Image: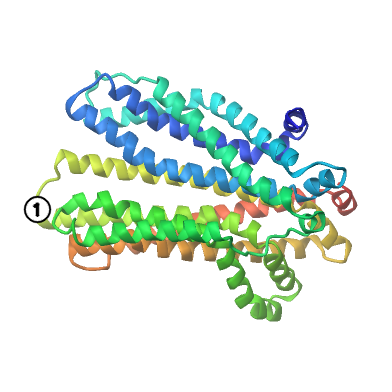
Amino acid sequence: MTALALRSLRKRAGAFTASFLALFLGATILMGFASMLDTASGTSGSAHETLVTMASVVGGWGLLLVVFAVTSTLTLSVRQRSAEMALLKSIGATPAQLTRMITGEAAGLAVVAALLAIGPAVLAGRGLLALLHDTGQVPADVSHAFGPIAVSMGVGITFVSAVGAALLTARRLARGRIADTLADTGTGRLTKKRIAFAGLFFAVAMSEVVVTVTVMKDEGSGAMATSGQADIFAALGLALLAPAIVRRVAAVLAGPLRRFGGAAGDLAVTGMLRRTNSMAAAVTPVILFTGIAVGTLYLQSTDNAAAAASGIAKTPEEKNIETLNFVVIGMVVLFTAIMLVNTLVAATAHRRREFGQTRLVGATPRQVMHTVAVESTVQTVIGVACGSVASLFTIVPFSLVRVDSPVPEGEVWTYVAVVALAAVLTGATVATATRRTLRTPAIEAVSA
């Protein structure tokens, strides 16, 4: 099965593109921030503290996002191979053999992606250090170091994340009956493990809220240390519950869409109810992007307003925190935006056969495009709504301790800009991927 896994990687390179990109970008981010620890080994005093903070705080947040994104992308990739799994089982492959094949593919992909990410990670690390030089937080004579800490963390975490995600999904598919595997459309049912992890993330988020409004009440900007992480954990919790949320929303919208949406609305409802897990995978990066971007932006604007009202100039430590916040925003915007595009392209390309069947029974390409547009709109609305809820875990407690109000300081256009960017990324990506998929003649798409 190991040989089969290697041949699969060589012959089906296009099918592994989405997973490879997630692993590559994840390894780049992990090693880029971890290199701050290598750099810190030759420093002392405030410079050492700043570098360690950058690696541990921002890198820690990045670690959560990277592991989650890698797991989500690989899980989607494996689920899309249900027909292949059923065929292999029908000719005698055992569950253990199938599991070894899929985990072997993931392991090989992770190693290649991590090694290729070393070069970009060095550049990313130098860019982070240059940012700290420009803001005066680290002396200009401190040079960037990229050593064993960065490499071991990047390769190790990427490898473990990939193999773990592949193992969990592969075992579920491999142990199912052939008929069940072929019919695996993802109806949105949540496993006990998924619910447990979602509950754990929400519990951590609530604990951060409680600590912020109690222990950190009189700490000023220091309250960012706890409130700034709450939206991340809340967003991850909601992302884990996304399949159930998508199914519930689709059920609620089924009547109106079928009544007023015509053929496209009916097709969209049918697709959303049958492909709940795939839709949830596309919703996940929208939740993360909206929740973390909105939460962090309003966190910083509220802190700036509180500092201006007090008339006291910001300390170097507070400027350090502000820099970290903007680094987080930049990292989140870039990584989640790429993951959003990556996931949507992979999910849409996999629907080539579905689109072909729909056209053969009478649907026009325009109706297919309208159907996908309806689905994309619903995905965006769900993702933005859930992300907005997640951002409240950061915004409300921090605003209470800084400006004595649950309403944050800042312009409403900040929120509008985040929502607009999420909508544009989702809509443009889905439309482009669908048009490209529809170029294939229906007969060829069905027989592929």
**Amino acid type, label 1:** Gly
- Using residue 126 as the reference point, say whether residue 216 is left or right of it: left
Q: Nearer the viewer, residue 384 or 30?
A: 30
- Using residue 50 as the reference point, say whether residue 27 is left or right of it: right
Q: Nearer the viewer, residue 47 or 344?
A: 47
Name the quadrant containing residue 247.
Answer: bottom right
Residue 423 visible in the current orientation: no
Give percent across and percent down for residue 137. 22, 31
Label 1 crowd (10 A; few <14 / some 14-19 / many >=20)? few
Name the quadrant containing residue 209.
Answer: bottom left
Name the quadrant containing residue 231.
Answer: bottom left
Residue under the image location 23 percent in, 27 percent down:
48
- Position of residue 386 relative to residue 34, above or below, is below
- Position of residue 327 relative to residue 304, above or below, is above
How many numbered callouts?
Answer: 1
Give percent across and percent down for residue 241. 53, 62
Residue under the image location 66 percent in, 80 percent down:
255
Q: Which residue is mark 1?
A: 311
Q: Nearer the viewer, residue 375 or 18?
A: 18
- Using residue 6 as the reference point, say whether residue 314 is left or right of it: left
- Using residue 332 as the reference point, say whether residue 37 is left or right of it: left
Residue 369 visible in the current orientation: yes
- Position of residue 374 relative to residue 322, above or below, is below
Give percent across and percent down for residue 1. 76, 32
Question: Mark 1: which secondary structure?
Answer: loop
Give percent across and percent down for residue 85. 78, 46
Q: Is the image coloured rainbow, by chain, by secondary structure, or in one colour?
A: rainbow
Kindly give the residue lying farthest to the left in the view shown: 311
